[in-house]
């Protein structure tokens, strides 16, 4: 079915108050079958519709017309499940390490996965690595131990499940009192995003 044909079918359903069955390739469950009641077409590629499938009460949602296919009621596809919990795509430090490697691509950083977490280390002239990572992603408990060595107080310790340490914030007064940017996240994927952003910004020359 072409885009124009889909738009025509949606307009017809809006006029008749008709319920349509569609397979939607976008959203949280791509390829799921959904029952929708179209309300109006917002622009060339967006239809606003009531999501009926599995919902106790209809939920208004926006659908991309190019990502939906109108199918017969009994079409063989898994139905959309509004109660299905999304799986965190990055669940372990090994997953995080692989995601960071992919996100940074070719990089002058030495990326290390060890018992502390995932670290971005500068390479020294002799081929060895700096002893302390410029950017470190680790479990918050391990991270607490690491930053306590810098003299941080208990109040400075992040409270999320995953912590990202870096970059070093230089003392503007030149008194040697540098600080470290500390952030924590409940989701490991968010910590990975932060790590990649910092590592790209602080890239060694």
Image (cartoon, helix red, strand yellow):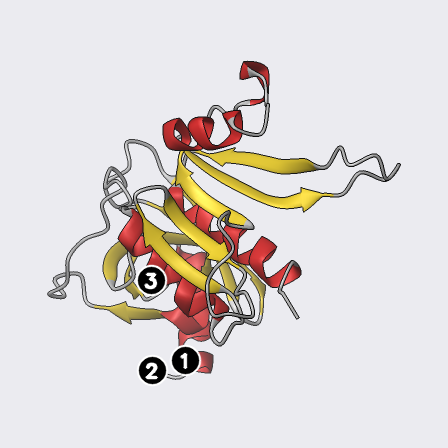
The residue positioned 56% from the left and 35% from the top of the image is 183
Disc 2 and disc 3 in contact, CB within 8 angstroms: no
Quarter of the image for the N terminus: give it: bottom left
In the rendering, at what x and y percent does residue 95 appear?
A: 29, 55
The tag earlier along the polypeptide, 1 or 3, is 1
Tell me if residue 88 comes above or below residue 22 in the rendering.
above
- Is residue 68 something one can see in this rendering? yes
The foreground one among 190 and 104 is 104
Residue 5: numbered disc:
1
Dividing the picture into quadrants, the one containing residue 83 is: top left
- Is residue 12 something one can see in this rendering? no
The foreground one among 149 and 95 is 149
Residue at the spot of label 2: 1
Label 2, secondary structure: give it: loop
Q: Is 193 positioned to the left or the right of 170 in the image?
A: left
Disc 1 and disc 2 in contact, CB within 8 angstroms: yes
Mark 1 and mark 2: Cα distance apart in space: 6 Å
Q: Residue furthest top?
A: 154
Label 3, secondary structure: give it: helix
The tag earlier along the polypeptide, 2 or 3, is 2
The residue positioned 66% from the left and 71% from the top of the image is 205
């Amino acid at each position: 079915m072409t885009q124009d044909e889909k738009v025509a079918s949606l307009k017809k359903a809006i006029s008749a108050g008709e319920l349509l069955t569609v397979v939607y390739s976008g959203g949280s469950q791509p390829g799921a079958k959904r029952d929708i009641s179209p309300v109006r077409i917002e622009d060339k590629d967006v239809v606003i519709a009531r999501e009926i499938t599995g919902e106790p009460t209809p939920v208004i949602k926006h659908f991309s017309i190019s990502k939906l296919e109108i199918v017969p009621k009994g079409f063989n596809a898994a139905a959309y499940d509004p109660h299905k919990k999304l799986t965190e795509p990055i669940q372990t430090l090994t997953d995080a390490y692989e995601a960071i490697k992919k996100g940074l691509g070719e990089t002058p950083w030495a990326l290390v996965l060890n018992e502390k977490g995932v670290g971005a280390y500068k390479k020294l002239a002799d081929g060895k690595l700096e002893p302390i990572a410029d950017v470190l992603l680790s479990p918050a408990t391990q991270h607490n131990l690491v930053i306590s060595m810098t003299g941080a107080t208990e109040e400075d310790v992040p409270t999320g499940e995953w912590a990202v340490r870096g970059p070093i914030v230089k003392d503007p007064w030149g008194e040697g009192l540098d600080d470290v940017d500390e952030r924590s996240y409940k989701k490991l994927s968010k910590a990975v995003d932060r790590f990649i952003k910092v590592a790209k910004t602080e890239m060694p020359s």
